[in-house]
Amino acid sequence: MNRLVILIVLIFAASFAHAIDPLPFKDRAEEVRFQNLTRELRCLVCQNQNLADSEAQLAVELRRQVFDMMHSGKSDEEIKQYLVARYNDFVLYDPPVKAGTLLLWFLPGVLVLIGAGVVFNILRKKSRQPVVATDPEEDW
Amino acid sequence: MTRLIPLLIFIALVALLAFGINWNKHHEMFEVPSPLIDKPAPEFTLPLLYEPEKTLARKDLLGQPYILNVFGSWCPTCQDEHPILTRAVKPLGIKLIGLDWRDDPADGKRWLAQFGNPYDAVLTDPDGHAGIDFGVYMAPESFLIDAQGVVRYKRIGMFTPELIASELMPQLKTLGQPVTTK
């Protein structure tokens, strides 16, 4: 039983592990900043992974680049700008609102509103109909 | 009329899915449009593969258009693209510059010795920094850069004869580049 518990704990702990490339962080705060930043950036090779998780060679190099830029005193915003200038807004998991991303940002909301409108209409029509006692003998 | 609504919704859904399938046929899902199009190409000064003591810089290439083709000996698709570069791109008469990206120069040389060298000059970028400046993420990639050093067109992935005819040739014509037909 104990062994099983340890095994389960280890399996769940694995998802928090960050093996990847050992970078010489100067303190814990810097490491946290690095992890947060690379989680917001998308890997271009495995496009559904973020930069923090990807094992692609390019991701390793881009992580190194992010790390070097952090060390040379660049802000998170400057690092993002550096990558966007090369790889487009696509690298950001949180793309800015602008003409090209309006659909991306607002279409889901618009669709939800349309759906809500349809449901509302149906409910209103139903509530206007007189309540008809259903025949228990009704043939389904 | 209200009975038709489910049918209409169904037709709209079919149209949407058909559009998606058709769109996917003509677009690569992995393709990220380059923000460099119509912008000056990034600065670079890189050693030549065959004369590592010499370098070639962006400014040295100003004055005539060229194609910068990013390849690597480790890249299988580059091997597929190689005969197309030799047989279909090189005869167009445009300057062809190779960028041996993220590759050991010795491996790059051996690769070119094995398959032949279609390039007018080959640059080396073993640590991949120049590639990152160009926003390269998936070799092979090709950039068409005009005489003023502005990026006019980018191809992500290999060139095919169809793409050369439908995309590259029209771009070359707008540059006023005399296109030699085979």
Image (spheres, rainbow, N blue to C red):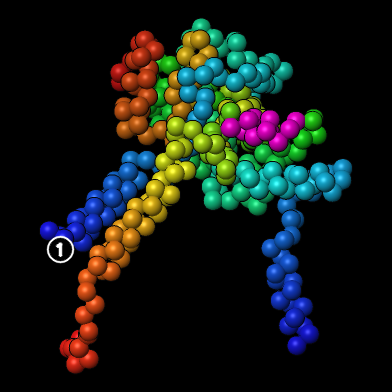
Residue A126 place in picture, x, y as percent? 26, 69
Q: Amino acid at mark 1?
A: Arg
Q: Secondary structure at mark 1?
A: helix
Which span is picked out in magenta?
A74-84
The residue labelled by disc 1 is B3
Residue B63 place in picture, x, y as percent? 51, 7
Q: In the orientation shown, which residue stands out farthest toward the top?
A: B63
Q: Is residue B76 above or below residue A80?
A: below
- Crowd band around label 1 with a 10 angstrom C-alpha radius: few (<14), some (14–19), many (20+): few
Answer left or right for A7 relative to B162.
Answer: right
Which one is nearer the viewer's eye here, A8 or A37?
Answer: A37
Q: Quadrant of the N terminus of chain A?
A: bottom right
Which one is nearer the viewer's eye here, B4 or A4?
Answer: B4
Q: At 52% across and 24% down in the image, what residue appears?
A: B36
Answer left or right for A138 relative to B110.
Answer: left
Q: At 48% across and 10% down in the image, what residue appears?
A: B147
Quarter assignment of residue B102: top right
